[in-house]
């Protein structure tokens, strides 16, 4: 099956599945449609690009199933004019989708290989408002000001409060938390003044965050 047919049929099937979940945000779905998913998975997994399975990529990382990725972005509610921080670039798919909706996206990863490959994809898609950087996100990211939205895709044992300091009032953050040794759930924090409203969302397959930059990859 050609990449174009994979994209067309895969996206159509995805939209049907998402609508069954009550996800029909036209701006989000348009951003997903404009971001060819097959570009973000290894060539041997092209036909699985729009499946619900996790797909392995370099450095022992993976691309989450497309339903999970869009479900997360639906709950993050990125809007035009916003600044977004993503911790855990991976393939760059979610950063690319967010870049079509936000004013600016800063995405970081500890692996140089993932950063370089993600940057190539952003260049290929002419997404100039996305900054991809190698950085250690395990203790927060200082010196970058505040953000309207923060998305973390590596799991913490407890909500990483150092990131909440980088949220504007009215901003929100979504991060995966290890609820037990074998269960990880996405949690959303919404900031109002100095207070936070916490909401548990759904189970996700993310792995615990690893500190420091990767020295070899």
Image: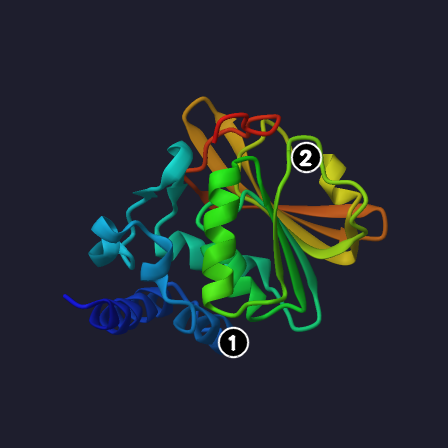
Q: Position of residue 51 (x, y in %)?
A: 27, 55
Q: Nearer the viewer, residue 204 or 83?
A: 83
- Along the viewing direction, whichever of 19 and 86 lies nearer the viewer: 86
Dot 2 or dot 1: first in sequence order is 1
Task: Report the residue at 31% width, 69% height from top.
Answer: 11
Residue extending farthest to the top is 181
* Above/below status of 207 relative to 12: above
Badge 2: how crowded within 10 Å, few (<14), some, or many (20+)? some
Residue 212 position in % (x across, y down): 62, 26
Judge left or right: residue 182 versus residue 128.
Answer: left
Which residue in the protein does label 1 denote? 27
The x and y percentages for residue 206 are 45, 37
Which residue appears at 47% of the width and 43% of the height?
114
> Which part of the image, by quadrant, shows the N terminus?
bottom left
Outermost residue, right side: 193
SS label for mark 1 = helix
User: Which residue is at 75% across, 36% downward?
Assistant: 162
Looking at the picture, the colour scheme in use is rainbow
Please, is residue 12 above or below residue 153 in the view? below
Marks 2 and 1 sit apart, C-alpha to C-alpha, by: 29 Å
Q: Which mark is residue 160?
A: 2
Residue located 73% across and 36% down the image: 161
């Amino acid at each position: 099956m050609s990449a174009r047919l994979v994209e067309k049929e895969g996206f159509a099937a995805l939209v049907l599945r998402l609508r069954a979940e009550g996800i029909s945000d036209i701006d989000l779905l348009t951003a997903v449609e404009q971001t060819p998913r097959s570009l973000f998975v290894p060539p041997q997994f092209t036909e699985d690009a729009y499946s619900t399975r996790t797909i392995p990529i370099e450095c022992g990382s993976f691309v989450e199933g497309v339903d999970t990725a869009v479900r997360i972005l639906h709950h993050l509610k990125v809007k035009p004019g916003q600044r977004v921080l993503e911790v855990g670039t991976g393939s760059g798919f979610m950063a690319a989708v967010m870049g079509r909706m936000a004013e600016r996206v800063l995405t970081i990863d500890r692996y140089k290989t993932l950063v370089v490959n993600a940057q190539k994809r952003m260049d290929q898609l002419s997404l100039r408002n996305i900054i991809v950087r190698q950085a250690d996100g395990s203790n927060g990211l200082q010196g970058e000001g505040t953000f309207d939205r923060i998305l973390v895709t590596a799991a913490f044992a407890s909500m990483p409060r150092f990131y909440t300091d980088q949220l504007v009032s009215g901003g929100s953050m979504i991060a995966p938390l290890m609820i037990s040794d074998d269960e990880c759930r996405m949690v959303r924090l919404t900031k109002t003044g100095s207070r936070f409203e916490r909401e548990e969302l759904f189970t996700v397959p993310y792995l615990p965050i690893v500190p420091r930059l990767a020295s070899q990859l």
